[in-house]
Amino acid sequence: MKIGILGVEHRHIYGQLNSMLNVGAVGVTWWNQGEPSGTTKDFATTYPNMQQVADKKQILEDESIELILIAAIPCERADLAIEAMQHGKDVMVDKPGCTTLEQLERIRQTVAATGRIWSINFSERFEVEAVTKADELIKAGAIGQIVQTIGLGPHRLNLPTRPDWFYDDQKYGGILCDIASHQIDQFLYFTGSDDAQVVAASVGNYANPNTLGLQDFGDILLRSDHAQAYIRVDWFTPDGLPTWGDGRLTILGTEGYLELRKYVDIDGRSGKNHVFLVNDDTCQHIDANGAGLPYFQNLTNDIANRTATAMPQAHAFKVMELALKAQNTAIRVGI
């Protein structure tokens, strides 16, 4: 399967592309809007065999390309995805898939009209083997019925490396639209919820008075008809942590619980993909490395077979709908 890329403004494009290459896809061409940046120069160096084109039509009109990857500035992703689908391409977009409810509605209409796939690579689920292992344990009945998730998404700010759009909430969509879409995705997936209510939400800037467009804190309470969630996201990861963020997910069941320490275990175990399982029979640490990342092969199969094993289309829509509703209704805290 041949891949074209529209937009490499976010470094998540590396995870998107490398994961597809690992399942046998071939990267062909890429395009990016605007003047060359550090990201585009790095991308060109990393993938010298991919052709950079000046006009995105060269990608859109290439009938041999089946899948378009998008990691453009978040506010530009919807229009690029719509254009790609209208040219007969399936799409994998970096989160957030869009930044307004109006964009989301146009994406819904385009999917319905074209029959193409619009999939969001929620990297905190699809690129984390600890999540794959947790899914296996839950399906095996290890913790019973899931009643709550607690999702924590802390990130390191790295202000000097950030582009201008990073400080403009109209461009990146706000912290709940952006980062918290990961945790909403995991809540809906693990609880088997088709819908949920945003009970409460807040966003704020506590520590960055020189960049008030940046939201450095946000949280959400969600409730479905059978489960609940608490979500906290922030840009407060201190420099002493040996990675960009101590991302965690706690999944509470009626017969036990799981805690995922995805990227680091501050208790001292090396590496990442740590899963802790507690139920009536055990209290143990599980090394989840090697559990696999099935989303990318599943998406490849879906494109070939016109199925929806990687992510049901309704799920992608619902995650972004809830993220945008939370963002739009959040109270302001901090400065």
Image: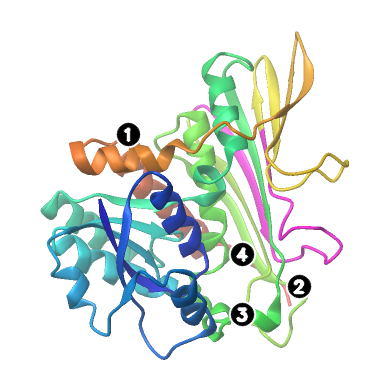
Image: 9 above or below 89: below
How far separated are the C-alphas under marks 2 and 4? Answer: 14 Å
Of mark 1 and mark 3, the one earlier in the sequence is 3
Q: Which residue is mark 2?
A: 206
How far separated are the C-alphas under marks 3 and 4? Answer: 26 Å
Of mark 3 and mark 2, the one earlier in the sequence is 3
Q: Position of residue 207 (x, y in %)?
A: 78, 75
Q: Amino acid at mark 1?
A: Thr
In which image quadrant can residue 4 be found? bottom left
Q: Which residue is mark 1?
A: 309
Q: Position of residue 294 (x, y in %)?
A: 44, 36
Of mark 4 and mark 1, the one earlier in the sequence is 1
Of mark 1 and mark 2, the one earlier in the sequence is 2
Q: Which residue is mark 4?
A: 331
Q: Is residue 245 magenta?
A: yes
Observer able to see residue 172: yes
Q: Amino acid at mark 3?
A: Arg
Q: Mark 4 or mark 1, which is nearer to you?
A: 1
Q: Mark 3 or mark 4, which is nearer to you?
A: 3
Q: Mark 2 or mark 4, which is nearer to you?
A: 2
Element carrying mark 1: loop
Q: Which residues are magenta?
A: 226-250
Q: Which residue is depicted at the point 29% across and 56% down?
A: 91
Q: Is residue 12 magenta?
A: no
Mark 3 Cα-neighbour bin, 10 Å: few <14, some 14–19, many ≥20 = few
Q: Which residue is mark 3?
A: 162
Between 33 and 4, the residue placed more toward the observer is: 4
Observer able to see residue 311: no
Q: Are marks 1 and 2 in contact (CB under 8 Å)?
A: no
Q: Amino acid at mark 4?
A: Ile
